[in-house]
């Protein structure tokens, strides 16, 4: 029988006199290994996409098939959008201006989910005119930003209605008014829970844009057959997503966003959560493809030559888009404009955007020149009484509320699914969601230096390697004088192996009890963790997690492979105890069962749980006991409902709540799973 092991909270002591450096295994450059490996995976996907694009450019028929395939994959990445509900629009007030007016408008993109917007209309409208939707970039004051007011004024001065609306997390639509987080950070936090239920931040942002377009098209002053969209930075992101998602957008002008993702990841790295989709790399979709999804509709790329969005990648995106449009016989319908300045909706790009809209929506090629605009104050443009819809409506529904409701719905829907009753069925679901179907052992690549001798045990510093991963720094705690087979314990702590190595810590105690103990740095933790970007929300953990989501291999899956490889390595050691299978007649090829325990500490808890489920009942017959310590216990309760927790993004498997939650793993592991 598997011998028991006492795992007490008192064992979780901090490192004593020894420092983390005493237990280091890797040299310089370790902190970039994970991001570099993920970039390599992404580059392989980019290369495959490029090869397919070249093949598809051979004929208009192949381009059309490609367009349909991309649209289908985009719909999958975006997630299920809700049914349309009444907008319940209200014009709160009107600001008279020189030759135009600004209507302060509010409508509901979902029931009790208010959108605050400004509609710019010419005074002398005699019939339906073109209308342009203007999504905001990452200005804290949203629609009131000077640059975004300016482009709306330029549009309306040129006979085009302009609707600009506040995004979630900006302007009057902060979703977390009691949390010191807004703009990009709030978009990131929204994305954490949304990923778990099979959505993402873009799901909400795109739906707000579609409903805003509904409102714009409903206005009697606007011709619904002549609609456009332009925005800068984060507004360029939304212009890009919306122009591919909504066929009503006839003309588009994204500014300061489009580049190649290869260059993005090589330079500034992943951005906020709405800019990246789960498995986008695996689907083979780059920024250019959002243009070609709508081919041959007129689209212009607006760029800043000194932008942090790499201009080389932007030019490459245009070359690809023009090749696709050219194959369809419409090379003139895709344009490129750049100006030697920095990131922002500057006057040259505003003029280029409006000129493009006039050309294709009004049949007018005249030059556009911007006069000094008369700007309004933030307060003047304010739509809600207090300036925050969350404070003004007692029944306001936030995006977190929507995600929590979806998590509840998924929990009820999966209650009668097979994986709720059968461990092997659950193992199959976990295997599918994580993309793990084998338990290949790690290899011992190097033992560094002599053992570190301590009272009752010694510590060996090891470098393990596994196929498809980065090096695994590890500490092996070996009992002194122990003879014969013994049990083994693997420890994974999100604070790194050094956090477990104190002489009065958990590994030392287990070693003194006679167990062989292996403590590892799973990818991105310990020695391979990076602190170059160390913000509370946007940091190196987030960057790696979003890149992992992009390639379709979330960090939890990556680290679960690390743990499984280390477990398999432990199983293969001669000194690890194996109990004989009780009934050899059941299967002639039955193997011995290893006495293995697994401990996951802090954010290592969910990793350990997944590894235990996948290890149990596999070919190596490792019925692993698992304990989680100081860990989250549920995606629904600890991630979806409380998305502001630290680095929760690295614990999420996109869409996993469609199939299971962490308590399901615990329940079906039964007595083999404990927590403290």
Image (spheres, grey):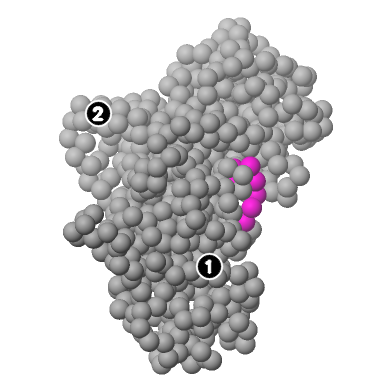
User: At 33% from the left edge and 71% from the top edge, which residue is drawn?
Assistant: 578
Q: Residue furthest right?
A: 386
Q: Is residue 644 magenta?
A: yes
Q: Is residue 361 visible?
A: no
Q: Nearer the viewer, mark 1 or mark 2?
A: 1
Kindly identify which residue carries mark 2.
65
* Image spot of residue 318 (x, y percent): 36, 41
Nearest to the observer: residue 137 or residue 586: 586
Name the main secondary structure of what is drawn in magenta.
loop
User: Against 310, is 422 above or below?
Assistant: above
Q: Residue furthest top?
A: 126
User: Against 193, is 333 above or below?
Assistant: above
Q: Of helix, strand and loop, which one carries label 1?
A: strand
Kindly identify which residue carries mark 1.
493
Mark 1 or mark 2: which comes first in sequence? Answer: 2
- Residue range highlighted in magenta: 639-646
User: Against 387, is 96 above or below?
Assistant: above
Number of residue marks: 2
In the displayed structure, does residue 231 sit left or right of residue 644? left
User: At 72% from the left edge and 34% from the top edge, which residue is drawn?
Assistant: 172
Nearest to the observer: residue 457 or residue 135: 457
User: Against 95, is 504 above or below?
Assistant: below
Nearest to the observer: residue 504 or residue 163: 504
Q: Which of the numbered marks, if any, corresponds to residue 429? A: none
User: At 79% from the left edge and 33% from the top edge, which residue is drawn?
Assistant: 391
Nearest to the observer: residue 184 or residue 660: 660
């Amino acid at each position: 029988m598997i011998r028991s092991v006492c795992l007490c909270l008192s064992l979780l002591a901090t490192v004593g006199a020894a420092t983390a450096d005493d237990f280091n295994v890797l040299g310089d450059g370790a902190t970039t290994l994970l991001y570099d490996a993920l970039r390599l995976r992404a580059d392989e996907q980019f290369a495959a996409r490029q090869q397919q694009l070249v093949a598809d450019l051979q004929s208009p028929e192949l381009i059309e098939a490609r367009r349909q395939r991309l649209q289908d994959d985009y719909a999958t990445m975006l997630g299920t959008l809700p049914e349309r509900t009444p907008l319940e629009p209200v014009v709160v007030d009107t600001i008279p201006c020189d030759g135009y007016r600004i209507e302060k408008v509010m409508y509901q993109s979902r029931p009790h989910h208010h959108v605050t917007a400004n509609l710019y209309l010419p005074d002398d409208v005699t019939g339906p005119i073109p209308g342009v939707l203007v999504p905001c970039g990452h200005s804290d004051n949203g629609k009131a930003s000077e640059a975004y007011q300016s482009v709306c004024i330029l549009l309306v001065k040129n006979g085009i209605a302009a609707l600009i609306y506040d995004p979630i997390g900006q302007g009057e639509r902060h979703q977390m008014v009691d949390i010191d987080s807004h703009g990009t950070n709030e978009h990131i936090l929204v994305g954490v829970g949304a990923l778990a239920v099979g959505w993402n931040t873009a799901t909400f942002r795109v739906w707000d844009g579609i409903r805003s377009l509904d409102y714009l098209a409903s206005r009697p002053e606007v011709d619904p057959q002549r609609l456009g969209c332009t925005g800068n930075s984060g507004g360029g992101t939304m212009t890009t997503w919306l122009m591919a998602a909504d066929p009503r957008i006839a003309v588009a002008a994204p500014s300061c966003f489009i580049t190649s993702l290869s260059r993005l990841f090589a330079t500034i790295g992943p951005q906020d959560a709405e800019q990246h989709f789960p498995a986008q790399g695996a689907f083979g979709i780059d920024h250019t493809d959002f243009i070609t999804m709508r081919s041959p509709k007129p689209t212009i790329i607006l760029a800043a030559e000194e932008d942090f969005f790499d201009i080389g990648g932007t030019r490459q995106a245009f070359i690809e888009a023009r090749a696709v449009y050219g194959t369809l016989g419409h090379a003139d319908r895709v344009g490129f404009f750049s100006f030697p300045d920095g990131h922002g909706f500057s006057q040259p790009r505003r003029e280029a955007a409006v000129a493009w809209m006039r050309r294709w929506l009004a049949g007018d090629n005249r030059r556009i020149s911007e006069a000094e605009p008369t700007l309004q104050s933030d307060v003047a443009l304010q739509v809600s009484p207090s300036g925050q819809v969350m404070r003004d409506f007692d029944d306001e529904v936030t995006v977190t509320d929507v995600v929590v409701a979806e998590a509840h719905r998924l929990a009820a829907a999966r209650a009668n699914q097979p994986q709720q009753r059968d461990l092997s069925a659950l193992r199959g679901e976990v295997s599918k969601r994580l993309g793990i179907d084998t338990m290949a052992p790690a290899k011992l690549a190097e033992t560094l230096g002599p053992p570190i001798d301590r009272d009752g045990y010694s510590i060996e510093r090891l470098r393990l390697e596994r196929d498809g991963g980065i090096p695994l720094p590890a500490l092996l705690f070996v009992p002194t004088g122990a003879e014969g087979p013994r049990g083994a314990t693997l420890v994974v702590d999100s604070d790194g192996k050094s956090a477990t190595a104190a002489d009065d810590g958990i590994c030392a105690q287990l070693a003194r009890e006679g167990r062989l103990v292996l403590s590892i740095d799973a990818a991105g933790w310990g020695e391979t963790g990076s602190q170059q970007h160390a913000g509370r929300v946007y940091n190196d953990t987030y960057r790696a997690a979003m890149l992992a989501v992009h390639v379709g291999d979330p960090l939890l899956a990556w680290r679960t492979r690390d743990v499984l490889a280390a477990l398999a390595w432990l199983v293969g050691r001669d000194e690890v105890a194996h109990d004989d299978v009780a009934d050899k007649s059941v299967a002639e090829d039955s193997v011995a069962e290893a006495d293995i325990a697994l401990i996951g500490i802090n954010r290592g808890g969910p990793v350990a749980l997944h590894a235990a489920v996948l290890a149990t009942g596999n070919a190596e017959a490792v019925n692993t006991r698992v304990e989680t310590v100081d860990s989250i216990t549920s995606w629904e309760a600890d991630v979806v409902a409380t998305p502001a927790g630290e680095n929760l993004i690295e614990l999420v498997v996109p869409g996993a709540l469609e199939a299971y939650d962490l308590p399901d793993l615990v329940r079906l592991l039964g007595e083999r799973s404990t927590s403290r």
